[in-house]
Image (tube, rainbow, N blue to C red):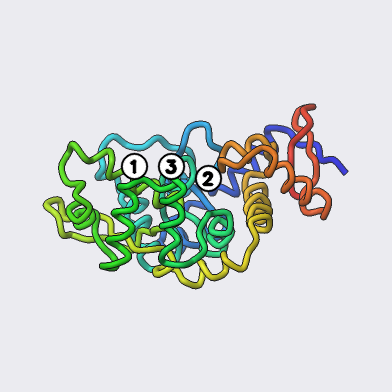
């Protein structure tokens, strides 16, 4: 069976799924958590060229550019919830997709962990480092967290000898690397710097042990299929190529996952304005 979808139909359904309607606007912390659970994963703010909902526009109940001034009420709400929800272990937050701030539901996080090169042990990082998949700076930061527990960015900079503006790029790159590799998690906020605001990080297996355990019980194939299913459910329709680009998956593995979901009837082939090769929910 092949579905026929128009761009107008896709856009209309996306607006509802993304909460881009005034009556669906996210206006409480609980509603923000429910939104992330509903869509599975979203960006914090819009990302050009990436089809994925974002919390900022869901809070606004429609498309809206970011204001130039940071005292906008809805911007403060969005910014606060991206801090409070992860701190309460209600969502996962990291620069995960496209190295952009991403919120992931705790039900979907194990699927991403299943696709990582982690084994759930504290010394996993040594194998990554030996194989050249972890930088020296990331190794230093990881070992500080391993030894000292949750630490603020300021403490990590000092302990890893990455203090000062001349080390800023190396430090930020190492943090992105550890987040994208699902080795660390943002777990809170600290006021222990001159600005009174900095992130606190911990090792992901220590901060979210149940989600990591579920990830270890999930095969990478299962994880990929579950992520793809949730993604297609949220965005209504996408091509395997679009899915592969967004998540950084190989075209071959993405096609294999899509074929499996088509065979089992979870997904169906779709045609959009006469163009074949799209995927939609059955």
Q: Could you tell me which quadrant the N terminus lies in?
A: top right
The crowd level at tag 3 (other Cα within 10 Å; few <14, some 14-19, many 20+) is few
Q: Quadrant of residue 167?
A: top left
Evaluate whether residue 118 shows in this view. yes
Q: Residue furthest right?
A: 1
Residue at the image position 73 percent from the left and 41 percent from the top: 255
Picture mark count = 3
The crowd level at tag 1 (other Cα within 10 Å; few <14, some 14-19, many 20+) is some
Residue at the image position 55 percent from the left and 47 percent from the top: 18
- Badge 3 is on which residue? 99
Which of the two labelled residues, at mark 3 and mark 1, occupies the earlier sequence position? Answer: 3
CA distance separating discs 3 and 2: 16 Å
Evaluate whether residue 55 shows in this view. no
Residue at the image position 34 percent from the left and 63 percent from the top: 202
Whether residues under marks 3 and 2 lie with C-beta atoms below 8 angstroms apart, the answer is no
The crowd level at tag 2 (other Cα within 10 Å; few <14, some 14-19, many 20+) is many
Is 206 above or below relative to 97? below
Q: Quadrant of residue 213?
A: bottom right
Q: Position of residue 151 (x, y in %)?
A: 25, 62
> Dot 2: what SS?
loop
Classify residue 160 as left or right of residue 22: left
């Amino acid at each position: 069976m092949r579905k026929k979808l128009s761009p107008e139909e896709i856009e209309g359904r996306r607006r509802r799924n993304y909460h881009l309607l005034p009556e669906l606007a996210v206006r409480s912390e609980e509603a923000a958590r429910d939104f992330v659970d509903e869509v599975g994963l979203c960006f914090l703010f819009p990302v050009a060229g990436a089809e994925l909902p974002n919390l900022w526009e869901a809070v606004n109940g429609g498309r809206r550019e970011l204001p130039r001034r940071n005292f906008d009420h809805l911007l403060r709400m969005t910014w606060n919830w991206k801090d409070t929800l992860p701190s309460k272990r209600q969502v996962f937050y990291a620069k995960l997709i496209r190295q952009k701030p991403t919120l992931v539901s705790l039900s979907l996080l194990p699927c991403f962990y299943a696709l990582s090169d982690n084994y759930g042990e504290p010394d996993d990082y040594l194998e990554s480092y030996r194989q050249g998949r972890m930088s020296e700076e990331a190794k230093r930061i990881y070992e500080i967290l391993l030894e000292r527990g949750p630490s603020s960015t300021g403490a990590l900079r000092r302990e890893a000898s990455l203090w000062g503006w001349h080390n800023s790029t190396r430090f930020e790159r190492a943090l992105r690397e550890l987040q994208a590799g699902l080795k660390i998690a943002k777990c809170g906020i600290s006021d222990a710097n001159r600005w009174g605001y900095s992130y606190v990080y911990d090792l992901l297996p220590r901060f979210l042990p149940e989600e990591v355990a579920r990830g270890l019980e999930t095969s990478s194939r299962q994880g990929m299929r579950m992520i793809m299913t949730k993604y297609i459910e949220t965005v209504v329709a996408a091509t395997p190529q679009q899915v592969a680009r967004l998540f950084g998956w190989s075209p071959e593995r993405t096609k294999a996952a899509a074929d499996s979901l088509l065979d089992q009837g979870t997904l169906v082939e779709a045609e959009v304005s006469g163009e074949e090769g799209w995927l939609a929910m059955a």
